Image: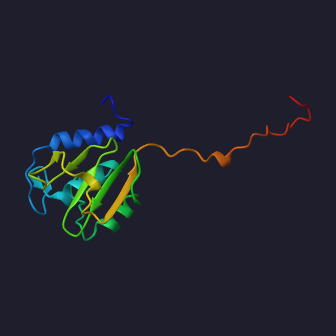
Amino acid sequence: MPGYGTDKEAALVALVHRYSGTPYIWGGDSAAGTDCSGLASWLANAAIGRPVFGDRFDTSSEESALLARGFRYGTAPGALVIGWNNHHTAVTLADGTPVASGEGGGVRFGGGGAYQPQFNHRMYLPMTPEPVDSQSHSDNPPAPTDGVDP
């Protein structure tokens, strides 16, 4: 999908498009319906290449589940961000688009996203390659090995 920084980002947007309108079903984890945690699970799973369905978490296990998937504490620009409290969770895609289930219906683009003030937990997964550490290279050319200066 053009316009997205990585194939991963495009895949997450496509996933939300595909299931947009899926009904809100508490504890759901299928194309028939899902709740807020189910949607967050789907997106976290898809972002790291796990099967979308069948490996869901809920708000009580969210922190450990996200850590196991490589998420980091806090937020970051250009990252998949998930915010939650004891009762609700929502996601903000890397391009800043909020997505939710249970905020006025089932799965949809919109809602408050991960940055809602009600959330007391936020974690993120970088969606673009990490920059190379600038300290790891040297400005000095390698020493000649054949005894002749270049």
At horizontal 10% and vertical 62% (from top left) the residue drawn is: 26
Hey, which residue is sitting farthest front in the picture? Answer: 117
Is 117 in front, or is 44? Answer: 117
Specify whether 30 is left or right of 81. left
When asked about the image quadrant of residue 29, the answer is bottom left
Whether 114 is drawn above or below 65: the answer is: above
Residue at x-position 8% and y-position 58%: 25
Q: Is residue 46 visible?
A: yes
Q: Is residue 148 above or below residue 64?
A: above
Instruction: Look at the image and tell me in which quarter the N terminus lies.
Output: top left
Q: Position of residue 8 (x, y in %)?
A: 35, 41
Numbered marks: total: 0
Image coordinates of residue 38 in percent, x first then y, are 19, 58
Name the residue: 13% across, 63% down: 27
Can residue 51 be seen from the camera position used here? no
The image position of residue 117, as x and y in percent, is 27, 60
Give the quarter of the figure containing the C terminus: top right
x then y, percent, for residue 55:
25, 60
| Residue at 12%, 49% in the rendered image | 31
Colour theme: rainbow
Q: Taking 9 as reference, is 38 left or right?
A: left
